[in-house]
Amino acid sequence: MFSILFYIGLPVAVFFHLAEEAVARRKFAHGWFFVLAILELTVACGATMCGMRELLEPLMALTWGFNMHCLWHLGRALTGKHYMPGSITGIVLLPYIGLTFADMLTQWSLLDNAIYAVAGCGAVALSMYIKVLIYRKL
């Protein structure tokens, strides 16, 4: 069963991930970064509240997207052989990532999970694209 810890875990995990990125990217850690970080945290909290009201789709999609985003950070750090902002939280969150993947894959069909994964990764990719556009203008 999708535990309450997973509901609480997503905004907490997003918060620590954003904090690591803010510390690592000091030259970007001003105005727009914090506006986007607050927006991402608000979306994660909103998805969590939906999940607590038994509307699990937004929470599952964002959990898939966030988990894949953390694994992407780890992959880039391992292949680039240098620190990538977000890598530390990716390592720390590996148990959370594994547990949520295992729970979602056992509770819902493969097709449902694929749909949630595509939607969540799309939302995370859009957020990253907006960050890149803003970073290039700064």
Image (spheres, grey):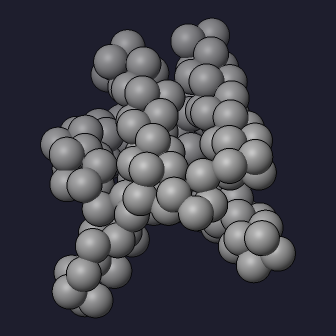
| Image position of 116 with respect to 39: above or below | below
Image quarter where the C terminus lies is: bottom right
| Image position of 68 with respect to 102: above or below | below
Image quarter where the N terminus lies is: top left
Which quadrant of the figure has residue 53?
Answer: top right
Tell me what residue is drawn at x 77 percent, y 51 percent. 32
Query: How many numbered badges does the structure rendering display?
Result: 0
Residue 58 spot, x, y in % from top left: 64, 36
Residue with the most extreme bottom position: 80
Left or right: 46, with 7 as reference point? right
Left or right: 23, with 124 as reference point? left
Tell me what residue is drawn at x 41 percent, y 58 percent. 24
Q: Is residue 82 visible?
A: yes
Return the residue nearer the eye: 88 or 32.
32
Residue with the most extreme right position: 137
Residue with the most extreme front position: 27
Tell me what residue is drawn at x 31 percent, y 40 percent. 100
| Image position of 11 with respect to 131: above or below | above
Return the residue nearer the eye: 127 or 61.
127
Q: Is residue 64 visible?
A: no
Residue 123 spot, x, y in % from top left: 68, 56
Return the residue nearer the eye: 17 or 105.
17
Residue 119 spot, x, y in % from top left: 65, 57
Return the residue nearer the eye: 66 or 104.
66
Tell me what residue is drawn at x 49 percent, y 28 percent. 11
Residue 132 spot, x, y in % from top left: 70, 73
